[in-house]
Amino acid sequence: MAMVNSKSNQRLIALLSFAIGTMAANIYYPQPILGLLANSLGLRPDAAGLIMTLTQVGYGLGVLFVIPLGDLFENKKLILTMILITIVAELVLGFSKSVIPYFMASVLAGLGASAVQIIVPYGTHLFDRASRGQVLGSMMSGLMLGIMLSRPLASLLTDLVSLHTVFFVSAAVMTLLLWKLASALPERQPTSSNLKYSSLIWSMKTLFITTPILRRRGLYQALMFGAFCLFWTVVPLMLVQSKFNFSQKQVALFALAGLAGAIVAPYAGKMADQGFGRKATILALAAGLVSFLINHFVVEGTWWSLTLLVLAANLLDAGVSAHLVLGQRAIFMIDPNNQSRLNGLYIGMIYVGGAIGSALGAWTYLNAGWGVASLVGALFPLGALTLISSERLFGYQESA
C-alpha cells in the first residue's frame, strides 16, 4: 500500500478506527443498564453482574482461540465473519425475554467483539513500519471513544426509547460496517497459513517463553489496566453510594471524563516512531501513579473533589491508552508472521490484570473505604515503574 499520509490511507485509518470503536462498544452497552436488564429477565439484582461477566468470558475465549487465527486465515474474511457473529448476537440480545438465550448471546457478543484485536495487527500490516505507532494511536483513539461513548449512549437510548433499543441500533451499525468493510478492506493472507490450528495455539506457549518484550510489555499494561479497572469499578460505587448521591445517568456522564485517553494515544505512538518509546512509557506509567495520588485527596460529596476525580480519570485513561499503544507497537515490530498470536497473548495478560484490579477495588472500597482503595490503586503503576527501572540493571534492551 501507499504511505500513510495519502488521502486514501487516512480514510482507511479512520474506517478501521470507527470499526474498532463500534465493535468494542458492544462489550460495554449493558453496563449502565444492568439493573433494568436483570429486572426484565427476572434475575435477582445481585446476579445482574453475570451479564457483564459472560460478555467478558466471550471476549476472553475470542482472545485465546480466535485472535490467533489472524496468523492462519485470510484476515478480511475473518473480520467480516466476526462482525456477522456480532450482528446475530446483538439481535438476540434485543429480542430476548428470558435468561438462557440472553446469556448465550452475551457470550457471543463478547466473542464477536474480540475481532477488535484482529483488526489492530491487520491494520499495522497495511502501513510502513516507521509510522506504525501513529497508526496504532489513531486506532486506539477509536477504541477509547467507543468505550467512553457506549455507556452514555445506552443510558440515553434507554431513557428516550426502550430498554433493548441500544442492541438494535448496534446491529444496524454493525450491518453498515460489514457492508463498508467488505468493499474497502484489502485482503491479507498470512504467510503461516500452512500451520494446523492445534500447532498454532500450542505455539503461543513458545512465543510467550521466548519473547521478553511481550512478557515485560504485557506485565506493564496488565498493571496499568488493573489500576484502570480498579478506578472504574470503585468510582461508580462511590458516586452512587456516598454523599455524591449520583443517579445512574450522572454516573454514565461521568464516564466521559476519560476523553484524554482518546486524544493522547496518537501522540504516544508518534513519540515511539521518533525513537522516544522508553520516555513515553515512563510518562504513561507516571500519569497512572499521579492519578491515584490525586485520588487520595478526594473527600466524598464535595465539588472540588469531583473536579479532582475528573482530573484523575483523564490522567489515568491517558496513561493506560498511551501505554497500550506503546506496548502493541513494540510487540508488532518483532515478527510480522506472529502478530495475531503475540497480540492475543498481550491482551490476555492485560485482562488478567483487569480482573485482579476489579476484584481488589470492589473488596477494598467496601471493606476499607476510598482512601485505602486509592492507595491500592497507586501500587499498580508504581509496580510497573519499579519494573521498568530494572530493565537496564538486568541488561534488557528494547529496540525502538
Image: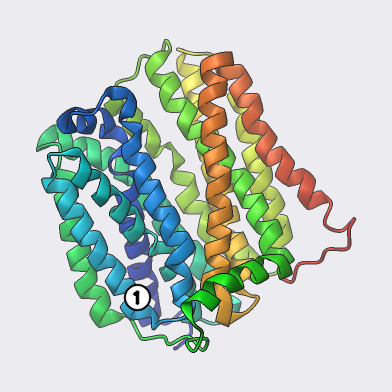
Q: Does 28 sit above or below residue 278?
A: above
Q: Does 262 sit above or below residue 327?
A: above
Tell me if 79 is positioned left or right of 125 in this view.
left
Tell me if 227 is positioned left or right of 28 in this view.
right
How far from the left and from the top, in percent, is residue 315? 56, 40
How far from the left and from the top, in percent, is residue 58? 37, 53
Q: Quadrant of residue 91?
A: bottom left
Residue 123 appears in the figure: no
The residue at 66%/32% (across/down) is 378
* Amino acid, disc 1: Leu
Q: Quadrant of residue 83?
A: bottom left
The residue at 35%/47% (across/down) is 55
Locate the N terminus by quadrant.
bottom left
Question: Quick one: 367 or 173, which is closer to the camera?
Answer: 367
How far from the left and from the top, in percent, is residue 326? 61, 61
Q: Quadrant of residue 33?
A: top left
Reading the image, the residue beneath label 1 is 78
